[in-house]
Image (cartoon, coloured by chain):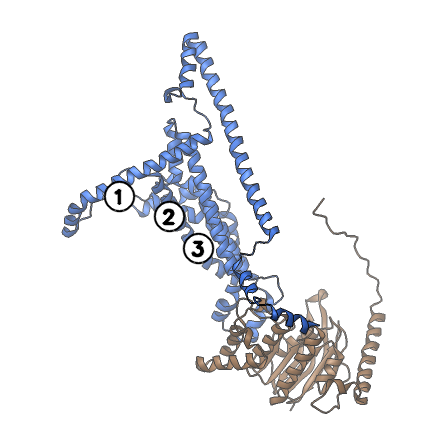
Amino acid sequence: MEQEIILKKDRQPFSFVKPLVAKLTPKFNRGDLLGSLKKTGITVISILLFIGLWHWGAKALYDVEADYKIEKALTERGAEAAAAERACIASGDSSCQPNTLPSPSQVWASLQSLIADHKIIKADKAAFVEKMAATNAKLTAKGKDPIVYTGRASFIDIVFTSIRTVFAGFLLALLIAVPIGIIIGLSAPLRSAFNWFIQVFKPVSPVVWYLLVFMIVKTLYIGDSTDNAFVISFISVGLCAMWATLVNTAMGVSSVDKDYINVAKVLKLGTFQKVFKVILPSSLPLIFTGLRITLSVAWMVLIAIELLAQSQGLGLFVWEEFQNGANDSNSKIIVAMFVIGIIGFLLDRFMLTVQNMVSFNKNEAV
Amino acid sequence: MAYLELNNVYKTYGEGTDSTEVLSNINLTIEEGEFVAIVGFTGSGKTTLVNLINGLLKPTSGEVLFKGKPVIDTSHERGVIFQNYSLLPWLTVGQNVYMAVKEAFPKEKKSVLNQRVRDYVDMVNLTPAFNKRPKELSGGMRQRVAVARALAMDPEMIIMDEPLGALDALTRGNLQDEILHIWSKDKRTALLITNDVDEGIYMADRIIPLKPGPNATLGPEFKIAIDRPRDKTALNDNPNYKKTRNAIIAYLMDIGEERKSVSATEYVLPEIAPKSFVA
C-alpha cells in the first residue's frame, strides 16, 4: 500500500516543485498570524487608550488651573482684568499659560524642539571645530592642550552622557560583584563573614551612596580642577546597583548541582579546572539574572545620582528644567521621562537576550 | 589478593541520635576481570555502596581496598557511570568526553586526545551527534555519552550505578549488549548495580543481592554458570537461567516480606492538602 502511494507521487510531473514552493513561501500559520495580530492590536489599543486618558487628564488639569487664574484676576483686579486674562489664555500666549501637566501634543512638540535644538548645537560644534582646526594644530604642535567646544550640551548629548554613566557604573559593578560573588560563593566561612556586610549595605539609598562616594572622591581629587561629577556619579551608580549581582553570583556558585560536583570529583579536576569548567558555567544563568537586575537598578538610580552630582545627564536635565519653570519645561520633563523609560526597556531586552544565550535548561535531568 | 575488597564496611549518615545506618557489615570481594552485579530494591543503599567504592564517600568503619590499597579518594583507575548520566549540559558530546580524556591523559598531545575522543564517541555510535548538547539527545544517547566518557579514561574497573534504569526496554537491551561487547574486548573488571534481575543474569558472572536498608547488607551470592557470549533469546530456554532466576527472585521476595513485617509500625500522615494558587 505504501509502495503504491510513493509510485503515484513519482508519476506526477511537477512533484519536485512542491517542497520547493513550500520552502519559499513563508510559513504563515493562520492561527499564528491571527495571534500576533491580536497581540499587536491589543498593544496599540492600550497605547491609544493611555494617550487618550493622558490627554483628557491634562485637559482637566489645564481647565482647573485656567479657572483659578481667571478667578484670581477677578477677585484681585476686577472684571476687566479677568476678561483680559481669559482672552490671553485663549490666545495661547506664552506669558499667561497655565502651568500644569502637559498634554501629549505639547510633549511631542517639545521632543521636536529638542531635536531641532540638537541640530543647531551640532552645527555650532562643527563650525567651532572647523574654525579652531588651525589654532588647535598649532597648539598641539607646541605641546599644549587643544581648545575644545564648551558650549551647552544638546538633549542627545545629555542622553549619551547618561548611557555612558550607566555603562561605566555597570562595568564597575560587574568587576567588583562577580569576582567577590564567586569567592564568597566558594567558601562558606567567607560567605558568613560577608553576610552582615551585604545585609547592611544592600538597602542603603542611592542618595547616601552618592554622599559617601563624594566624600572619598573629593579628597582623592584634591588640587585637581577637572570635573569629577562623572566619576562620582558612575561610581555611585555602580555601588548602588552591584548588590543583586553579588548576591546572585554567590548563590549560583554555592548551589551548583551536586551531580556536577561529583563528576568533577570523579574526573579528578583540579581546583582551577573545577571552578572554571564546572562551577562557573553552571552558575552563569544566575549570574546573568543578577546582572540584568543590576543594569535596571543602575538605570533607575542614575537620575537621582546625576541630579546630586551635577553630572551633565538626564537627571540634571530633569532637575534643571523643573527649576527653570519655562513654559515648555514640564513637557521637556515628560520627554525625558519617556526617553528614560524606553532606554531602560531596551537595556532590559538586551540583557534578556544575552541571558537567554548563556542559559541552558537547568530543570532537565541531564 | 582480591582486586576489590570491602571488609566489614559500615556507613552511617548523620550524627548522634539522628544517625541512620545505611549500610552495615558489607563484605565483598571482586577478582580481576570479573563482572559482578549487585541487585537490590530501590532505596536499599545501592548508590551509597557505589560511592564508597568509587571514593566519593568514606566508610564510617571498615575498609575499602582497591588492589590492596585503601580507597581514600576518587581515581582514574575506577571509571564511574552515574545513574542520572551527569553530563555537563553546557558542553557538547565531544566536549564532555574530551574533558575526561584530558584529565586522564594530561601529558598527551591534543591531536591524540581528539582522536581518542572521536574513537570512543564512535564506539558508542554517537558520531552524528558529536557536536550536540545533552539537551538535544534522547535518554539512551545521553547514557551512551556517559559510557563513552567513563571508558575513554581507560579505567581498570568500571562501576555502573543503575546505568540503564531510566531507559525503555529496547534501548536498554541494546546498551546492555554494547556494554558487554566493550567489556569482553579487554576484560576490564566491572561492577554493575541494578534493580533488574534479568539484566544481572544476562550480564554478570555473579549476582549478589543487597538486603534493603536501613542496615542494608549483602546476601548470599549466586553464580551465573552460563557460557558467554550469551544469547538473550536462547537464554529463556536455558534451564540454568530459569533456576538461577527463580532462586534470586524467591530470595528477594523473601527479604521483601521480611522487611514488610519488620516495618509494621503505622505512620500517621499529617493532614495536609495542596495549596490552591488559583482561588
Judging by the rendered image, the residue that carries numbered circle 3 is A174
Q: CA distance from mark 1 to mark 2?
A: 22 Å
Q: CA distance from mark 2 to mark 3?
A: 15 Å
Determine which quarter of the picture holds residue A14.
bottom right
Tint applied to chain B in the drawing: brown
Which sits earlier in the primary sequence, circle 1 or circle 2?
Answer: 2
Circles 2 and 3: CB distance less than 8 Å?
A: no
Q: Is A222 placed above or below A280 here?
A: above
Judging by the rendered image, the residue that carries numbered circle 1 is A225
Foreground tag (1 vs 2): 2
- Residue B20: in sight, yes or no? yes
Quadrant that contains the N terminus of chain A: bottom right
Image coords of residue B255 (percent x, y): 82, 76
The crowding category of the residue bearing disc 2, from other C-alpha atoms within 10 Å (few below 14, some 14 to 19, many at least 20), is some
Tint applied to chain A in the drawing: blue
Q: Is A184 placed above or below A221 here?
A: below
The kind of residue tagged 1 is: Ser
The kind of residue tagged 3 is: Leu
Which chain's residue wears label 1?
A
A105 or A170, nearer to the observer = A105
Kindly identify which numbered label has been placed on residue A164.
2
Helix, strand or loop under label 1? loop
Q: How many marks?
A: 3
- Residue A246: in sight, yes or no? no
Image coords of residue A362 (percent x, y): 59, 62
Report the residue at 17% width, 51% height from top.
Answer: A140
Report the residue at 42% width, 36% height from top.
Answer: A335
Image-based side of A245 in relation to B78, left or right: left
